Image: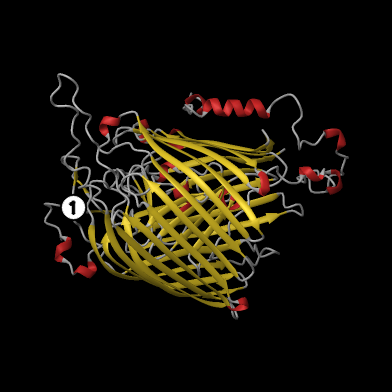
C-alpha cells in the first residue's frame, strides 16, 4: 500500500518555526476579535434548496467585524483586461475554476503562450510569447519584481499558486509581463483554502492558505504548497515545495506596513545540476493613500539562491536586492502608474523607470501608453508602447498596438574559485569552459519592435476576434535556465502572423433551457516560418543556413499553436450553491526549435546547434463540481496516450496522467 502523501512531505526548514509560532498566537484560548458567538446567531429557516447555507441577518453582525483590521490600498491597473488590449486576468474564483495546477499551466491558457518545460514536475520551467527570451519576460509580485537568480528569467517551477489572490498577464508583441497579487483579507472573517489531490505516477498535490484579519494587531496570512511525482516506473522523481507568510499592520496617517517572506525549493533529481535548489525572497513595504485616487508605495526586497551542491553550479550564488517606489493615480478619465527601482547585483541594470497611463475616451473606447528607461553600466536604454481600442458598436470593436526599443539581458556572474589555502597552490576548481560569459554573455542588448492590429465581434454570447501580428528583432536571447543554458544567441529578423480567438455558444434543442453554459472555445496562432526543418549536426539533413534568412525558424516560436475545447460552465439553484465545469479539448503546437541539440550517442548538449522537438499534442478532459464551498475535480491529460511529447530534447513527458482531488474554501 502506498504511504500517505503527508508522510512524504518535506518540512520547510526555516519556515516551520515561524508557522508554529503564528498558529500558537492564533489558537490561544481567549476568543479572537471578530469571532461571532454561536449563541448570538438566531435560527434561520432553511430554504427549500437543501444545499442552502444558514444566513445571518446583517444587523446581527457587529460593524467592526465586516471589515479587516488592515485594508491595503490597491493600485490602479492601466489598461483593462480584454483580448483587444492583450491583457488577461484571473481572480481567486477564476484560478480555482481553472484546470491549472501550476502557474505555468494557468498561463498556458493565453493564446500564443508557449511553455518550455525541462520535464515533469520539479524541473525548470519557462514561458514565452512571440519568441520572447530572457530580456523580455518580467515577473512581479505585489509590485516587487521577482529578480532572476538562476538564469535570465525566474524559474517558474519556483513560482507557485499558493497565497495568490489574482494573476494579471500583459502579453505585448514586445514583452511578457506577469503580475502576481497575494491575499490579505477580504472582510472581517478568517479565510482558509485547502487543495489536495492525488493521481497517476504517485503524483500528490497539497496547497493550504490561511488568512486572519485580526491577529497580532494586524493581518496574518500564510500559505504552504507542494506538488510531487515519481514519474514513469518511479524512475523520474521530482517535486516543488514552497511556503509564504505575510504580516501587515496599520501605521499612523492611514498607512500600512507589510512584511513578506517566501521560500520555494525544487528537487530535480539527476537530470540537472545542481539537483536541489531553493530560492528565498523577503520584502518590507509601506503603502499610503494620502489623497483620493492617489496611492504610494515604498519597498525593499532581497532574493537569494541556495543549493546543497554549490560545486556543481558554474555561477556565483549572489544575493540580489532592490529598493523601489510606486505611485498610482485613478480617476474617471485617467489611470496612471509610475515605478522606479534601484537594483544591486552584477548582471542587472542599476536603475529602472517605468510609466504607464490610460485615458478613457468616454463611450468611444480608450488609449494607453508605456515608457521604459533603464541604466546598464554606461549605457541607457529606452522603449515605448502604445495601445488604442474602440468600444463595441453593434458588437464590433477595433484595436491596435505598436511599440519598440532596446532591451537588456540579465545575466549571471561567473563563479570565482576560492583563493588557495596554505600549502595548496592550485586553489578551487575552475568553472566549466562553456559557462560564465560564453553561456550568458553580458551585458547584451537587442532591439525589438512589433505591432498588432485586429477586430472583435460580440453578439448574444458569440465572441470572435482576430489580429494581424508583426515582430522584428535583431537578436533572440536565451532563457538562461538549465534547460537551454548550453545554447547561444541567434539572429532575428521579421516575423508576420495572425491569431484567432473565439467562443461559439452551443444550443441543445431537446433541453428546455438549451444548456446556455455550453460553448466551443478556442484560439489559434500562426507564423510565416518553415516547419519541417531538421537541424541535426552530422545527420545530412537540411541545415538552417540553407534556408532564406526570413524562413529560418525562431526558437520558442512554433509555426502553429492552438487550443480548443467543448466547455460547459453554469451555476444552478436559487442559492447558487451548485456550480459545474466541464471541458473536453486539445492543446498543441507544431514542431518547435530550441537553442541546443541533445546528441543521442553522447547524451551531451552541443552548444551553438539548435534542435527541433516534435509537435506536441495533448487531449484532456476535466470535470469540477462545487457544492456550497467544496469543489471536487478530476482531470485527465493526454488521454489519447500520445508518445514523445517534449519541450526540449530527451525530456519526454509522461504518456498520460489523471489527477483528482478537492478544493475547499472555508470562512470563520
Q: Is residue 130 left or right of residue 444?
A: right
471 over 162 or under it: above or below: below
Q: Secondary structure at mark 1?
A: loop
Which quadrant would the C terminus be assigned to in this image?
top right
5 over 480 or under it: above or below: above
- The x, y position of residue 652, in whole percent, is 32, 44
Q: Quadrant of residue 605?
A: top left
Q: Determine the residue located farthest toward the top in the rendered image.
A: 423
Residue 495 visible: yes
Q: Is residue 445 left or right of residue 547?
A: right
Q: Residues within 10 Å of mark 1 (few under 14, many from 20)?
A: some
171 or 580: nearer the viewer: 171
Residue 101 visible: no
632 or 125: nearer the viewer: 125
- The x, y position of residue 92, in whole percent, is 60, 49
Residue visible at 68% across and 55% down in the picture: 571
401 or 395: nearer the viewer: 401
343 over 585 or under it: above or below: above
- The x, y position of residue 358, in whole percent, is 54, 69
- The x, y position of residue 312, in whole percent, is 26, 32
Its colouring scheme is secondary structure
151 over 85 or under it: above or below: above
The residue pinned by badge 1 equals 609
Labels in figure, total: 1
Q: Is residue 59 left or right of residue 570?
A: right
Residue visible at 64% across and 67% down in the picture: 509
Q: Determine the residue located farthest toward the bottom in the rendered image.
A: 394
Amino acid at each position: 500500500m502506498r504511504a500517505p502523501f503527508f508522510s512524504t512531505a518535506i518540512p520547510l526548514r526555516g519556515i516551520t518555526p515561524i508557522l508554529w509560532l503564528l498558529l500558537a498566537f492564533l489558537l490561544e484560548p481567549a476568543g479572537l476579535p471578530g469571532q461571532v458567538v454561536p449563541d448570538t446567531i438566531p435560527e434561520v429557516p432553511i430554504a427549500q434548496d437543501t444545499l442552502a447555507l444558514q444566513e445571518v441577518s446583517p444587523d446581527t453582525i457587529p460593524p467592526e467585524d465586516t471589515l479587516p483590521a488592515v485594508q491595503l490600498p490597491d493600485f490602479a491597473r492601466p489598461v483593462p483586461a480584454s483580448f483587444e488590449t492583450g491583457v488577461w486576468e484571473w481572480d481567486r474564483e477564476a484560478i480555482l475554476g481553472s484546470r491549472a495546477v501550476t502557474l505555468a499551466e494557468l498561463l498556458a491558457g493565453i493564446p500564443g503562450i508557449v511553455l518550455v518545460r525541462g520535464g515533469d514536475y520539479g524541473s525548470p520551467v519557462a514561458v514565452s510569447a512571440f519568441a520572447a527570451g530572457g530580456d523580455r519576460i518580467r515577473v512581479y509580485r505585489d509590485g516587487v519584481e521577482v529578480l532572476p537568480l538562476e538564469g535570465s528569467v525566474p524559474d517558474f517551477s519556483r513560482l507557485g499558486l499558493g497565497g495568490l489572490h489574482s494573476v494579471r498577464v500583459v502579453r505585448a508583441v514586445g514583452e511578457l509581463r506577469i503580475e502576481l497579487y497575494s491575499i490579505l483579507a477580504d472582510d472581517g472573517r478568517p479565510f482558509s483554502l485547502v487543495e489536495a489531490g492525488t493521481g497517476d505516477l504517485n503524483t500528490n498535490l497539497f496547497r493550504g492558505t490561511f488568512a486572519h484579519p485580526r491577529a497580532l494587531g494586524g493581518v496574518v496570512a500564510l500559505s504552504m504548497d507542494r506538488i510531487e511525482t515519481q514519474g514513469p516506473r518511479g524512475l523520474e522523481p521530482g517535486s516543488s515545495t514552497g511556503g509564504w507568510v505575510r504580516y501587515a499592520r496599520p501605521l499612523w496617517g492611514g498607512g500600512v506596513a507589510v512584511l513578506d517572506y517566501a521560500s520555494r525549493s525544487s528537487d530535480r533529481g539527476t537530470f540537472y545540476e545542481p539537483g536541489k535548489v531553493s530560492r528565498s525572497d523577503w520584502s518590507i513595504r509601506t503603502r499610503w493613500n494620502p489623497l483620493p485616487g492617489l496611492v504610494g508605495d515604498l519597498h525593499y526586497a532581497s532574493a537569494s539562491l541556495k543549493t546543497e551542491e554549490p560545486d556543481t553550479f558554474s555561477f556565483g550564488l549572489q544575493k540580489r536586492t532592490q529598493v523601489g517606489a510606486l505611485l498610482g493615480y485613478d480617476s474617471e478619465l485617467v489611470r496612471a502608474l509610475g515605478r522606479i527601482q534601484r537594483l544591486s547585483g552584477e548582471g542587472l541594470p542599476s536603475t529602472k523607470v517605468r510609466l504607464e497611463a490610460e485615458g478613457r475616451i468616454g463611450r468611444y473606447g480608450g488609449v494607453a501608453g508605456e515608457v521604459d528607461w533603464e541604466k546598464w553600466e554606461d549605457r541607457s536604454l529606452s522603449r515605448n508602447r502604445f495601445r488604442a481600442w474602440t468600444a463595441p458598436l453593434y458588437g464590433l470593436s477595433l484595436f491596435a498596438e505598436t511599440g519598440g526599443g532596446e532591451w537588456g539581458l540579465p545575466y549571471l556572474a561567473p563563479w570565482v574559485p576560492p583563493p588557495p589555502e596554505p600549502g595548496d597552490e592550485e586553489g578551487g576548481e575552475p568553472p566549466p569552459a562553456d559557462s560564465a560569459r560564453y553561456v550568458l554573455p553580458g551585458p547584451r542588448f537587442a532591439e525589438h519592435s512589433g505591432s498588432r492590429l485586429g477586430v472583435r465581434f460580440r453578439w448574444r454570447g458569440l465572441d470572435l476576434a482576430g489580429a494581424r501580428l508583426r515582430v522584428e528583432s535583431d537578436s533572440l536571447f536565451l532563457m538562461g535556465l538549465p534547460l537551454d543554458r548550453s545554447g547561444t544567441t541567434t539572429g532575428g529578423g521579421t516575423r508576420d502572423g495572425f491569431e484567432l480567438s473565439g467562443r461559439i455558444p452551443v444550443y441543445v434543442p431537446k433541453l428546455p433551457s438549451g444548456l446556455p453554459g455550453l460553448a466551443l472555445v478556442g484560439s489559434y496562432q500562426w507564423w510565416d516560418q518553415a516547419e519541417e526543418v531538421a537541424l541535426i549536426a552530422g545527420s545530412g539533413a537540411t541545415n538552417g543556413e540553407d534556408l532564406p534568412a526570413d524562413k529560418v525558424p525562431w526558437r520558442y516560436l512554433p509555426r502553429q499553436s492552438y487550443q480548443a475545447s467543448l466547455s460547459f460552465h453554469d451555476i444552478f439553484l436559487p442559492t447558487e450553491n451548485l456550480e459545474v465545469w466541464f471541458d473536453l479539448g486539445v492543446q498543441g503546437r507544431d514542431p518547435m526549435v530550441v537553442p541546443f541539440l541533445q546528441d543521442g550517442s553522447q547524451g551531451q548538449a552541443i552548444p551553438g546547434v539548435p534542435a527541433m522537438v516534435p509537435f506536441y499534442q495533448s487531449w484532456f478532459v476535466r470535470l469540477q463540481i462545487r457544492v456550497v464551498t467544496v469543489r471536487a475535480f478530476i482531470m485527465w491529460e493526454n488521454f489519447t496516450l500520445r508518445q514523445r511529447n517534449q519541450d526540449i530534447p530527451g525530456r519526454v513527458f509522461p504518456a498520460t496522467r489523471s489527477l483528482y482531488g478537492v478544493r475547499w474554501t472555508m470562512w470563520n
